[in-house]
Image (cartoon, grey):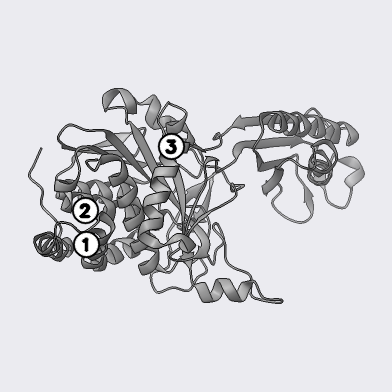
Amino acid sequence: MSSCSFPRGALSAVALLTLALNAGAQKSLHQQVGPIVNGMYPSLDALYKDLHANPEIAFQEVRTAAKLAGEMRQLGFDVTEKIGGTGVVAIYKNGAGPTVLVRTELDALPMEEKTGLPYASKAKTQSNGRETFVAHSCGHDIHMASWVGTARTLLAMKDQWKGTLMFVAQPAEETVSGAKAMLADGLFKRFPKPDFAFALHTSPSPYGFIGYKVGAISSNSDSLEITFKGRGGHGSAPDKTIDPIAIAARFITDVQTVVSREKDPAEFGVITIGAIQAGTVGNIIPDAAVLRGTIRSYQPEVREKLLAGVRRTANAAAMMGGAPEPVVELVPGGAAVVNDEAVVNRTAAALKTAFGDPKVVQVRPITASEDFSEFVNAGVPSMMFFVGVLSPEDVAASLKPGGKPLAFNHSPFFAPVPEPSIKTSVEAMSLAVLTTMAPK
């Protein structure tokens, strides 16, 4: 393992820490973290904006992974690349103690950014056989900058903790497949299985706020792809055809009755069709229509009901249209992330001490899904928490009658406020790790 060498932007942070410790070693951990983060922020801002402007989609994160691997090598981590495709694992040993995993995601979304920011993405790539824009509209670039900042902070404070840091940069979170790929590639066999694991996620709430919860904090997810088969022909003679677009449209409407009429109204469940591909021009009826969508739930029995309802409704729609049986593919995605009670309680107490009770709040589980659950379900006591990234003024205005709606994650207008969002994320994650590794 090479000796620790900090990037230029982090040197002032180390100097600040040294002064702080010499002036009074009695200072609490959270009082020490703040000055370190402030000192390194300019370089984190530059890293964030570079990542934001150069996004890559699932399993294509070659540049992104190399960027993070380089950052961690500069810090003295032992870095291994190409785990589970494009994943990165960085290990730093600092004496006897627990192994703690800190996860970030690498991937962006196949969509166009419309924020108008000076560092907005203009990148394009190929996805599902066609060219698409790419954008970090879910905040993974905030996560990555914070991940690097947390590593720097913990190394600057390495006399305050003992154990092994295991920093994992995971590909393909948006397709809920990257964590599984890393585990299949021997993540917990080639490297130490962690004693604890942490992850954070951006939230469309005021910056400076942190949300946490014991138990399930995200949903189950499954993806669907249905190919409705028809008989193509001229648009002026639909009677000579079997129109797969009409069949697909019927399915899209009818499948919602599975949610509204078959599922317990008190239980969460969603079926969303997010993509339709059919036809080429307006006067040709195609011979096939392909639908892609997502199914979300919390409870296993609701999950099964929704899956069965999708398959049954697709077959019924095709039968009503006199069409061949459709091809229905239902692919299991990520399971719900279930936070460990002991880890959450210990971490929440530390965060409340640092940020104040009003800014560290319990939240309801989100309806989105996260494959961080793969690490949790491998038997690692874990915690995922949320960090607000939007202007408090904008959030307050959105709550007023007629107020402008907020741009949530996956919106083309999603635009975190970088400095307070990254600083809060680095401080919170650093303290979370220190709660497990600092001497009692």
What SS does tag 2 mark?
Answer: helix
| Residue type, numbered disc 2 | Arg
Disc 1: CA contacts within 10 A as few (<14), some (14-19) or many (>=20): many
* Left or right: 215 in relation to 36: right
Q: Are marks 2 and 3 in contact (CB under 8 Å)?
A: no
Residue at 64% across / 71% down in the picture? 399
Q: Are marks 3 and 1 in contact (CB under 8 Å)?
A: no
Instruction: Find disc 1 in the rendering and name its residue.
Output: 36
Q: Are marks 1 and 2 in contact (CB under 8 Å)?
A: yes
| Residue type, numbered disc 1 | Ile
Instruction: Find disc 2 in the rendering and name its residue.
Output: 152
Q: Which percent across, then down, holds residue 126?
A: 48, 49
Give the Cα distance between marks 1 and 2. Answer: 9 Å
User: In the drawing, what numbered circle is on residue 342?
Assistant: 3
Residue at 16% across / 53% down in the picture? 156
Q: Which percent across, then down, holds residue 171?
A: 40, 41
